[in-house]
Amino acid sequence: MSEQVIEGRWEELIQRQDLRGRRVRVVIIGENPARPAGEHPWVKQLREWAQGHPKIDHFVDDSRESIYGGTIDAPR
């Protein structure tokens, strides 16, 4: 079996008639240069949401025991 290296964007490759019915291996070699990973819209929204909350400068015990240790009827 001979192997070929064919590079291109996914949208372009799936339209190629010469690849239809053939077995292929896909290797992702990089992000879309038009939109780097840090610039996805949901990343921007998440950062804006986080920046809208006050910063906590003191220690916060977020252990499982701390979260589930008390109940409404028997607070710690």
Image: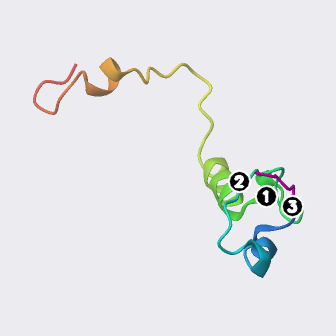
State the image coordinates of residue 58 (x, y, percent, origin top left): 57, 21
The kind of residue tagged 1 is: Glu
Q: Position of residue 33 (x, y in %)?
A: 89, 60
Q: Secondary structure of the magenta portion, mostly? A: loop
N-terminal of the pair, mark 3 or mark 1, is 3
Q: Nearer the viewer, residue 51 or 44?
A: 44
75 with respect to 15 (left or right)? left
Q: What is the spatial separation of the Cα atoms under label 2 and label 3, in whole angstroms?
A: 10 Å
Mark 2: amino acid: Arg
Q: In front here: 31 or 19?
A: 19
Query: Which secondary structure, mark 3?
Result: loop
Bounds of the magenta segment: 1-5
Residue type, numbered disc 3? Ile
**Residue named by callout 2:** 25
Q: Residue 6 carries which label?
A: 3
Q: Which one is in front in this view, the residue at disc 3 or the one at disc 1?
A: 3
**Taking 61 as reference, is 51 left or right?**
right
Q: Where is residue 12 in the image (x, y as percent from the top left)?
A: 81, 75
Residue 16 appears in the rendering: no
Q: How crowded is mark 3: few (under 14 residues within 10 Å), some or many (20 or more)?
A: few
Q: Residue at x 82, y 67 (%)?
A: 9
Q: In this view, does 19 lie above or below 47?
A: below
Q: Is mark 2 on a helix, strand or loop?
A: loop
